[in-house]
Image (tube, coloured by chain):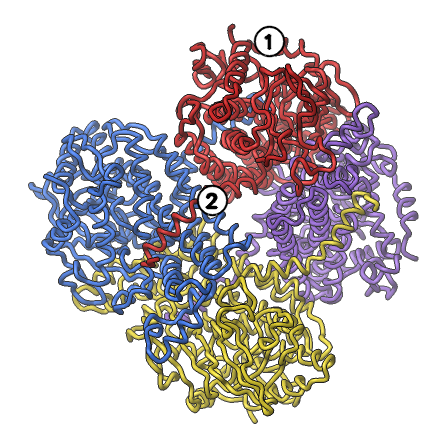
Chain colours: A red, B purple, C yellow, D blue
Amino acid sequence: MAMKTREEYIDSLRKLNLTVYMFGERIENPVDHPIIIPSMNAVALTYELASHPDYENIMTVNSHLTGEKINLFNHIFQSTDNLVQKVKRQRMLGQKSACCFQRCVGQDALNAVYSTAYEVDQKYGTSYFENIKNYVLHVQKEDLVSDGAMTDPKGDRGLPPSKQADPDLYLRVVERREDGIVVNGCKAHQTGIVNSHEVLCMPTIAMKPEDKDYAISFAVPTDAPGVIIIMGRQSCDTRKLEGTEIDVGNSEYGGHEALIIFDHVFVPNDRIFLNGETEFAGMLVERFAGHHRPSYACKVGVGDVLIGASALAADYNGINKAAHIKDKLIEMTHLNETIYSSALACSYEGVATPSGAFLIDLMLANVCKQNVTKFPYEMGRHAQDIAGGIVVTQPSEKDFRNEEIGHYVEKYLKGVASVPTEHRMRIMRLIENMTLGSGAVGYLTESLHGAGSPQAQRIMIARLGNFEDKKEMAKHIAKIKS
Amino acid sequence: MAMKTREEYIDSLRKLNLTVYMFGERIENPVDHPIIIPSMNAVALTYELASHPDYENIMTVNSHLTGEKINLFNHIFQSTDNLVQKVKRQRMLGQKSACCFQRCVGQDALNAVYSTAYEVDQKYGTSYFENIKNYVLHVQKEDLVSDGAMTDPKGDRGLPPSKQADPDLYLRVVERREDGIVVNGCKAHQTGIVNSHEVLCMPTIAMKPEDKDYAISFAVPTDAPGVIIIMGRQSCDTRKLEGTEIDVGNSEYGGHEALIIFDHVFVPNDRIFLNGETEFAGMLVERFAGHHRPSYACKVGVGDVLIGASALAADYNGINKAAHIKDKLIEMTHLNETIYSSALACSYEGVATPSGAFLIDLMLANVCKQNVTKFPYEMGRHAQDIAGGIVVTQPSEKDFRNEEIGHYVEKYLKGVASVPTEHRMRIMRLIENMTLGSGAVGYLTESLHGAGSPQAQRIMIARLGNFEDKKEMAKHIAKIKS
Amino acid sequence: MAMKTREEYIDSLRKLNLTVYMFGERIENPVDHPIIIPSMNAVALTYELASHPDYENIMTVNSHLTGEKINLFNHIFQSTDNLVQKVKRQRMLGQKSACCFQRCVGQDALNAVYSTAYEVDQKYGTSYFENIKNYVLHVQKEDLVSDGAMTDPKGDRGLPPSKQADPDLYLRVVERREDGIVVNGCKAHQTGIVNSHEVLCMPTIAMKPEDKDYAISFAVPTDAPGVIIIMGRQSCDTRKLEGTEIDVGNSEYGGHEALIIFDHVFVPNDRIFLNGETEFAGMLVERFAGHHRPSYACKVGVGDVLIGASALAADYNGINKAAHIKDKLIEMTHLNETIYSSALACSYEGVATPSGAFLIDLMLANVCKQNVTKFPYEMGRHAQDIAGGIVVTQPSEKDFRNEEIGHYVEKYLKGVASVPTEHRMRIMRLIENMTLGSGAVGYLTESLHGAGSPQAQRIMIARLGNFEDKKEMAKHIAKIKS
Amino acid sequence: MAMKTREEYIDSLRKLNLTVYMFGERIENPVDHPIIIPSMNAVALTYELASHPDYENIMTVNSHLTGEKINLFNHIFQSTDNLVQKVKRQRMLGQKSACCFQRCVGQDALNAVYSTAYEVDQKYGTSYFENIKNYVLHVQKEDLVSDGAMTDPKGDRGLPPSKQADPDLYLRVVERREDGIVVNGCKAHQTGIVNSHEVLCMPTIAMKPEDKDYAISFAVPTDAPGVIIIMGRQSCDTRKLEGTEIDVGNSEYGGHEALIIFDHVFVPNDRIFLNGETEFAGMLVERFAGHHRPSYACKVGVGDVLIGASALAADYNGINKAAHIKDKLIEMTHLNETIYSSALACSYEGVATPSGAFLIDLMLANVCKQNVTKFPYEMGRHAQDIAGGIVVTQPSEKDFRNEEIGHYVEKYLKGVASVPTEHRMRIMRLIENMTLGSGAVGYLTESLHGAGSPQAQRIMIARLGNFEDKKEMAKHIAKIKS
C-alpha cells in the first residue's frame, strides 16, 4: 500500500474510536479539538513532507523487509547511513515545526524491540522476532503511527515494581490466557498518543526475576478496549482556545503528552514481544534509550528556530549591531551545534546488532542527551535576554485588536520604525511560547526528562567510561608497575 | 495617620477610579478580578505583616521626617541598618508569597529621586527636594503604594529619545504651563501598577542636552486623567479564571505587569522632581538601579520556596536519599545564598549621599543583580529535574476531580504510598508555576530584565572596575616601572 | 612589648633552630634560601604594613586582653567590625603580594580554639580557656606568627583515625605524663610554617569516643624537639634559584607549604587546649573552617592583580578595545567581586560565641569558599586567553639577555610599539606564575583545597540549609495541609 | 623508500644542523638534551607505532600519489574515512603519550596548502599545486616531519601587517630573485620544530592587497641558513634536568614550543606555494584552522589519561566509593566525549575540495575547538579536586629517597594501606604535570590558543551560522509575511 497523504492520515485518525479525556471531559473528536489540532498538524507534517520532492530523500527509505519506499519513521535501521539520515530528518522537522513532532519515540521503540526480540529468541527459542517483524510490516504497509510507550508511573522510586504498595504502578500481566495476556497499568508522558494508531509498550527499567510479570513488551491499537487516555496540561494550553493567533506563539504546531491507562487490556499472542524474560528488560531499555537519545537532534532544529527568533528580536529592537548581542547568538549557535555533533557522531559510529538492525554508539548517544538536558535552558535564557522584558509583559492580541486602545499598543510596542508592531509582537510571543509556554514543555522540560532524566545518562556514562583502561594508561605514563 | 490594615488598603484601592484594560476589555473593578486578586493579595500582605507582631520589626521603621512608625516600604534609608533591613524583608516576603510583591520598585524610586533632587537643587536652586520630601510625607502619612516607573518603550534601541520616529517613545513634556506640565508617553513593564495609588516616574537612561523634554521626574495618582493601564499577559494567566486551585500552582499570590500610558497627563508643579536638568538623568537612573538591584533579594526568598518544593518533590517521589538529588538541592541552596551574599554586602557597605539618604555600594549591587539574571534559571532547571517529567504532563485538576476517571489519576500519580496524590499534584503545579507559569514571569524573566538587563550591569561593572588601579598593582608585582 | 618591625621579625626567625629539609637536604638557614625568601617577604609585609601610616588602621587593633595596639592577625575578634576589617585586610594584602601571605590560618586557629576552649571548660571544668588566653597573650606580646595546623595526612580516607593501618596517620597522644603529653604524627600542607614561631594544632575531623587520643589541640614552638619540616615542591619552584627576575613572574613574594612532622614531641600542660573531649573536635573543626573560609578574601586581592595583569596584557597586545576582551575583564571582575560579597556578608552577619569571641555566619562563609573553589580557575583561563599563547612559549630571560640572540627576542616579542618588550615579557611571566607557576599553587589549588575541599562546603551547606523550614514554606504556598 | 623506524628517525634528526638556543645558550645536540628528549620521544612514537602490528592500521594509509603505504601524518586526505582515521589516531596517541606529539600541525598544513594551491593555480595559472605535490611526495618518500608554521608575532594586534612599526612582525618577502625569494620574520609557538626536518610556512590572517609581501607560503629545511630556533620556557621545564623521575610527572613524553626566526632565508622557486595572491591568504588560514581544530581530538586522549589518573588518585586516597567523586569522574568523561563527538562529526561530514583533498565540516570543527578551549580546564580542576592538596605540596623525590627523612615521607604520604606510597606520589606528580606543569602547557594553554584562540572560533561560528535562514524559519512559524 502506498504511503498516506496528510489527508489520508487525518482521516485514519478520525476512524479511531479513542477514549480521551481532557479537563474532566470526554473528547469525542480529538481531531477537531483546538488544543490537539496543532499536535496533529506536527505529525501530519511527517506525512506531508514524505511526498514533498524537496524532502522525500530525507523522509523516506526503502524497507529492508519489502524493498518498498516507506516513511523513514517506520524503518528498521540497516546502516549508519540510515542512522545519520534520521538525525538530519530530526533537525529538519524541528526547524519546520518548532515543536515535538512525536514520532521518533515510535521509531526508536520499533528498533529497540526488533533487535532485542532477536536475541531473546536466540536464547529462549521464543518467536518474538517473528511477531515484531510482522508488526513492523503492518505498520509499514499501513503507514501507521506506532507510539512507543516506556515510562511507568513508578510510584515510590525507591522500590522495585513488585514491592510497590499498588502493584499496577508498573504495567504488568494480570492474566495469562491461551490466546494472549491481559495487562493492567499505565504509561505516563505519552507524547502524541492521541495522534497514533498503535502503541508499543516496553518495560521502563532493568528487572530482577521477581519482577517477571512486569517484563513485558507488546503492541495494541490505541483504541483497544480498556485503553483510556487522559491528556496532560501544558503551560498556556488554553490559549489555543481563545481563537486568536498571535498570543499562541506557534499557532500551527505543538505537541501533547498524556497518561495512557491500560485497564485490563487484552493482548493477543502475536502482538507480544517480551513476556517474563526479565534479564532482557535492561537490554530493551538501554537500546530504546540509546536510539532515543540522539533523536533529540530535533531540539537542534527547534533551537535553530529559537536562534532565528532571537536574531529577529534583535533586529526589531534595533540592537543587532551590539557586540554582546552578537555574542549571545554565537553562544546559542555553539551550544546548538555541540548537541548536533554528538547526535551525528553516535550515529556515524553505529554498529550492527545480531539482528542486523543498527544501533548507535551508546557512549556518544548518552553524551548527546546529557547536553540536551542543559543547553536548551541556556539558549532559552539567552533568547529572553535578547528579546527584552516585553516577552512576558506584552498585552494580549485582543488589546492590540481593540478599537479604543489598540492604537496605544500599536504605538508603544513599536521597535525599529520600519518593522510593523505586529511582527515584533509575533516574535515576542514565539519566544514566550518556546521558553515559557506550551513550546517550552517540549523544548525545555522534555529535553530534560525525555529519553531519560540527566542522572540516567550519567549512570550510563559511568558504565561505559572504561575507567579501568584509563587507569592503565595513567599507570603507563606515570611508570607505575603492578 | 495610622498605617492601613489589609482591609483598609483594599478599600482604598476600590476607591480609585482606574482605567484598566485586559484582553481587549475595560476592567471595571480590578480589585475583584480573579487575575488581579492574587497580585493584590501579595501587596496586601505587605500591609498585613506590618502590624503582625512577628514581623513588624522587619516591616516597619520610624520615619526620619515625622518620627512616626511607618511601613519600611515608604522609608528613606537613613543608615546601612535600614538597607540591610530591607534586604531581609525582601527575602522574608519572597518566602511568604513566592512571587513579586511589587512594592520595592516604589521604595527604590522614592529613595533615588530623594537623593538626586537634593543634588539638583544644590546646583540649580530648584525646589525639587522640597517637592519630593512633601511627596514622601504624603505617601508615609496616607500609607500609600507609590509605584516607581522607569522603563520607556524605547522604540529603536539604537536611537536616543529625541531621534525616534515617534517622539512619544520616551515619556516627555509636551506642554509647559504656569501651574505645571503636560506629559505624553508610556512606561512599560509596570509591576503592580493596578495595586498602586500613585506612580512616580523617572527617566530611563542618561541623557544629552537635546533630550531636555525627556529629562523629567514626577508623580501623579494612578487614576489621574489621561492615565490608561493595559495589562500584560503572563504565561498561564487564564488558569486563574478556571475556578480551580491546584492547577494555578500558587493560588494565593502572584504579580502583574502592565503598560501605563500617559495621554496628555497634567502634572502640577509641586509634583515635579526633575524637569530638563538632563545631566542628572544618569544619576537618577544609576541610583534607582543601584537601589533596585539588591531588591532582588526577594528572589532569594522565592528561591527558598522553590528549594522547599523541590525537596518535597524528592520526598514524594521517594528519591530524597539519592546522592545526586541531595547535591542538586545543595547546588540550589548555594546559588541562592550567593545572591543573598551580595545583596547583604552592598547594603552593609552603603554610604550616605549628600541628602543624608543612604545608597548601597554600586559595584556589589551590580554583582548581585548579575547573578540574579542567571541563577534562578539554573535553579529552575534543577527543580524540574528533581520533580520529574510529570511537572509538565500532569492531568488537570478537573480530571482529578472527575468521577469517571479521577480514580485513575489518584492511582497513577501516587508517589510514595504515605503521601496523598493530591499533595504531590500540588507540588508539581507549584514547580510548574515557578518555572514555566505565571510565577516564572517573576522568578525568571523579571530576574533577567528587572532593574536592568544583564548587559546594563556589565557596563556598570566595567565602569566601577578600577582597572587602572589594578594595572598598577600588577606592575608593582611584575616590577614594571614606567 | 611593641610590635615588631620587618627587620625584627626576620631576626627573630633567624634565632629559631628549625629542622627543615628541601630536595633531600637539610636547610641550615631558611631565612637566606632563595626559594623561601619570597614567602618570608610576604609574611614580613604583614609586619611592615602594620606600622605604615596608610595601612595601620586596617592592619592593627587594640587587644581585648591588654588594650594595647596589636597586629590584627593576633587578635580575637570582638565584633563584626573586626571580622569585616579582617576581610578588607585580606584583600589588600592579596593586592600587595599576589600570593598567600600565610598568616590568616594562624588567626583563624587562635579564634576557633579560643571560643571552643571556653565551651569545653563550661562542660568539663577544664582550664583550656585559661591556657589559650595565656597563649594568645604571649603571641600578642611577642608579636609572633603562630601557624594553625589542622590537616592530618589521613591515609585511607575511608577509615577513621583509630582504624588506620598506621595509627600515626592522624596526630595523636602517645604518652600522657603528669607535666604534659607526648604527641606523634604529622600535619600536611602547612602554609608558611618555616616563617612561623609557633604552631597551633587542631584535630582535622569530627570524632567519636574511640578516637580519644586524636582529639587534641595544643601549641608548641616550631623548633621544639622532634619537630621536623619537609618542604613541599611547587610548580616552577627552582626558577627562584636561577638568579633571574623576569622568569620568576613574582620575584618578591610567594608562599610555601610543608609537611610538619611531630616525632614524639612533648607538650606541657599549659599549652594543651583540648585533650580527649572528642565531641568538641567537630565544633573546633567547624569554627576553624568557618573563620578560614572567608579568609579566602585574600584571593580577591590576588584576583585584582590578575585582572590588572590581564588588562595590561590587553594593552600591550593592542587588543584593549575589542569587545570580547572587555567582556572577559568584566567577567573576571564579576567573579572576583562575587567572592568578595560573601566574604563580607558572612562577616557582617557574624555573631558572638559564649566566649565573647565573634564567629562569622557559617552558611555564607561556606558559600564564599565554595565559589573560591571555582572562580579563580575561570579567571585564570580568561587571563591566559587575553594574554595569548606567548604566556607559555616565551623564551627565557637568559635568551632575552643574550648578546647573540637577545635582539631577536626583543624584536619579535614586541607588542604595541610604545611598550618596551621587557614590560610585555614581565606581564606574561606574571600571568604564567599565577596560572601555572608557583603563584598558581596558591591562587588555584590552595583555593580549591584550603579551608576544606569543595565537598566539605557542600556538606556544610546541606547541614545549614534548613530544608525542613523551606518545605513548610512550599507547603504553605501550595496549600498542603498535613 | 620504506618508512623510517624510531631509530632511523632519531638518526635523521642527529644529521640536521639546527641552530637552537635555550636559556641563553646554543644547544649543540638537541637530540641529547634532557629537556628536548621527551618531546622527541613523543614524535618518535609516531614512527614506532606506524610499524607496530596493533597500530599500523590506524597509523598508516596508502598514498594517493604513489599508492605506497605511508605514515598517515604525511597523507593528503582523500575521503571522510581518512579524516575519521586521523581523529581516532589523535586520541590514541594522546592516550599513549599524555602530551602534544607535535605532528598534526604539519599534516594539517600540508592539506591546507595542497587544496588551496590548486585553487590559486586555477585562477592565476601558477604552478603552486605542482610544487606542493612534489613537496608532499618528498615528505612521504623520506618519511619526514614537516612542521606547519602559521602564527606570526603580530606586534600590535590592532594593526595589519603592513602598518606595523617593524615590518618584520609578520613574515614577509624582502627580496624577489629569479630563482626564488628571500624572507624575513618569525613564527611563534612552533610546536616540535626541533624534532622536524622541514618547516612549511603559511600566512596567519586574511590579507588585503597592500599586504602582498606577507601573503606567502613556502617550505624550507629546518636547518636552512638563516633559520634560528629559540626554545620557549615551559612551566617546570628544568625539573627534567634534575635527574629524577617521579617529580617530572611524565618522564617519557612531552612537548616543546619555540620561536623560529627567518633571518634573510632563501626559498627556491619550487618550494613556494603562495606568493602575493593576497585574497587566498584567508582561504589558506581557514582551511588550516579547519583541519587543525579537530586535531585537538588528541586532548581527548590526554584527557583519558587524566581521567585514569584521577580515578587512580581516588583509589589510592580511599575515596573511590564516594558519590561526589564518581560524579566528578563522570563529568570529566562527559566533557571529554563531548569534544570527541564534534571532532568525529566534522570529519564524517567532510567534503571534497576541487583538488580532491577532503576538508572537514567547518562549523562543527569550530564547535569542537571552542569546547576544547574550556573543557580541559574544567577537567583539570576536577582532577586536582579528586587528587587533594598533596598534588601541590608533595615533597620532592629527593626527600623521598633521602636516608634520614625518606621514611617520614613514605609513612605520611601513604594513602590506602595496600598501595605503595611511591605509586601515590607518582600519580600526584602526573596530575600536577598535566594541570600545572609542563603537561599543562599542552593540555591547557595550547588547548586554549592552538588552532586559534577562542574568539577566532566565535567569529567563524558567526560567519557560518546562517542567521538569515534561521530568521526565515522563525518567521514561518510566527506567520510573519514580509
Residue C440 in view in this figure? no
Outermost residue toward the bottom in this view = C1
Chain holding disc 2: D
The one nearer the camera, D408 or A361, is D408
Query: In the rendering, at what x and y percent does residue D154 appear?
Result: 29, 52
Q: Relative to A243, is A470 on the left or the right?
A: left
Does dot 1 land on a helix, a strand or a loop? Answer: helix
The one nearer the camera, C480 or B64, is C480
> Mark 1 near mark 2, Cβ–Cβ under 8 Å?
no
Q: Residue at x 83, y 63 (%)?
A: B57
Query: In the rendering, at what x and y percent does residue A209 appear?
Result: 60, 35
Amino acid on which disc 2 is placed? His
Image position of B19 with respect to D101: above or below: above
Q: Relative to A151, is D106 on the left or the right?
A: left
Task: Kindly identify which residue carries mark 1.
Answer: A7
Q: Residue at x 85, y 36 (%)?
A: B30
The one nearer the camera, D10 or D218, is D10
Residue D307 in view in this figure? yes
